Amino acid sequence: MEEAQKQEICVDERLQHIAFIMDGNGRWAKKRGMPREYGHAVGAKTFERVTRFCGDIGISTVTVYAFSTENWRRPQHEVRAIMKIFGEYLNTARKKADENRVHVVFIGDMSIFPENIREQMRTVDVETAQYPTTLNIAVNYGGRDEIVHAVNALLDEGKTHVTEEEISSRLYTAHSPMPDLIVRTGGELRLSNFLLWQSAYAEFYFCDTLWPDMGEAEIRAAVESFYQRKRRFGGV
Ligand code: FPP
């Protein structure tokens, strides 16, 4: 991307964290007479392009919703295809993280994955922890599950009464600031169990663009829209 263009949408401390609900892969593929799996493969490329671009314009934390606790209900062949794409990404994640100087963190209930995959995810996380920006990849993630997990962790520690701060500190995203902007592609106007706790004061940007078509122009529009909002966090 041109340097001059990049500077045009430089962000400041008001926009540190953008989270994406990457919706529309299946419809994008169907429109082209292709199987839904093809949409996910192209969507994975879009994920890499979009997250790199966000880093380029100065976003310090990006979170993506790659696979929800509910997505297992999809047909087996589709789940298998997404897991294959995810596995391929995982194999190259360290190299890509080094190139982009990004700390890659996998968030969600990892207990469902085999130990070798969990180990691979932990290794990428630990070995990229020195980088200045963060990419949270939500897999087997559910917002309600995350809150239950946080509360249970506190109960296990012997707490009988919990505070908001304590719950926040046990979320899968405890290492990240709360999202400033949540972007959902694909035309649906809902959160689908994504970052339920963290989204309390987030701004939302919904667009019809299907995820594989997501690009710089739409991100620019989302960022511009964000800067037109007045965030009051419950005040006046
Ligand atoms: C939603 O589109 C997309 C998903 C449930 C899967 C997202 C997965 C990827 C982008 C690829 C893997 C990611 C990584 C991190 C390598 P949809 O299938 O619900 O689309 P539809 O609404 O058109 O049916």
Image (spheres, grey):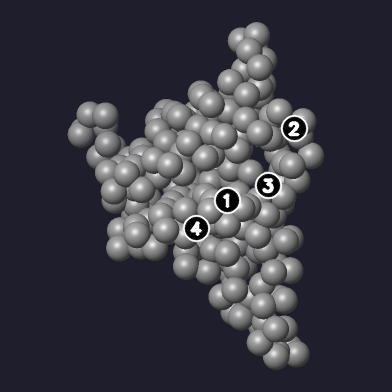
- Earlier in the chain: of badge 2 and badge 4, it is 2
Which amino acid type corresponds to the residue marked 1 in the rendered image?
A: Ala
Q: Element type at marker 1?
A: strand
Q: CA distance from mark 3 to mark 4?
A: 20 Å
**Which residue was labeled with disc 3?**
68
- Are dots 1 and 3 in contact, CB under 8 Å? yes
- Earlier in the chain: of badge 1 and badge 3, it is 3
Q: Residue at x 68, y 54 (%)?
A: 112
Which amino acid type corresponds to the residue marked 2 in the rendered image?
A: Gln
Which amino acid type corresponds to the residue marked 3 in the rendered image?
A: Ser
Bin the neighbour count of mark 1 within 10 Å (Cα to Cα): few under 14, some 14-19, many 20 and up: many
Residue 157 visible here: yes
**Which residue was labeled with disc 2?**
76
Q: Element type at marker 2?
A: helix
Reply above or below: 221 against 18: above
Bin the neighbour count of mark 2 within 10 Å (Cα to Cα): few under 14, some 14-19, many 20 and up: few
**Which residue was labeled with disc 4?**
119
